[in-house]
Amino acid sequence: MKEKKVQEDNRIVELTNDLQRTRADFENFRKQVENQKENERKAAKLATVFKMLPLLDDMDRAILSYEELKPLEKTLIKTLNDLGLEKIDSSEGVEFNPDLFDAVMVEGEGEKEVVSETLRPGYYYEKEVLRPAMVKVKKV
């Protein structure tokens, strides 16, 4: 009788352990699926943002060409920031950084390299360089 009770207790412990492992496996699986969904969502957002870059380039050129479009710039910048997109500062005089800029032309003689003109803006996406700015560089 006691032996049967011990066997039943062992069986209960064994089944309880199996149930706990199954629950842990299921929880790990659920977390893995959530991570995959999140990664896929981020990849889709990045692909969409990357496809928008030519449109943003056209908007920049339009704003520079037509003064009446200047008020749109603030709205555009706010919208870009909401998407996690930010322009790289490539204004004239900014020190050249090959991680942030693609230099297509270098002028002058000197030690220090600075941006002399922005040919195409660059962007950060969620604090990482999405596309470097295309610039002319001047040595001073």
Image (cartoon, rainbow, N blue to C red):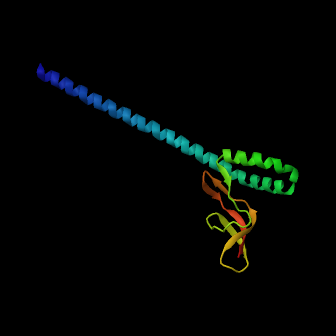
User: Which of these two is toward me, 92 or 104?
Assistant: 92
Looking at the picture, how far across and down is residue 11, in whole percent? 23, 27
Q: Quadrant of the C terminus?
A: bottom right
Please name the residue shown 74% across and 66% down the image: 92
Q: Is residue 123 left or right of residue 6?
A: right
Q: Is residue 60 left or right of residue 131?
A: right
Q: Quadrant of the N terminus?
A: top left
Please name the residue shown 73% across and 79% down the image: 108
Please name the residue shown 66% across and 62% down the image: 132
Answer above or below: position of 60 versus 108: above
Looking at the picture, how far across and down is residue 74, in whole percent? 76, 47
Using the rendered view, name the quadrant where residue 60 is placed.
bottom right
User: Which of these two is toward me, 98 or 89?
Assistant: 89
User: Which of these two is toward me, 19 or 116?
Assistant: 116
Answer above or below: position of 59 versus 1: below
The residue lying furthest to the top in this view is 1
User: Which of these two is toward me, 125 or 41?
Assistant: 125
Looking at the picture, how far across and down is residue 53, in whole percent? 72, 54
The residue lying furthest to the bottom in this view is 109
Image mark count:
0
Looking at the picture, how far across and down is residue 80, in whole percent? 70, 48
Please name the residue shown 66% across and 65% down the image: 101
Using the rendered view, name the quadrant where residue 58 is placed.
bottom right
Q: Is residue 67 left or right of residue 17?
A: right
Q: Is residue 69 left or right of residue 38?
A: right
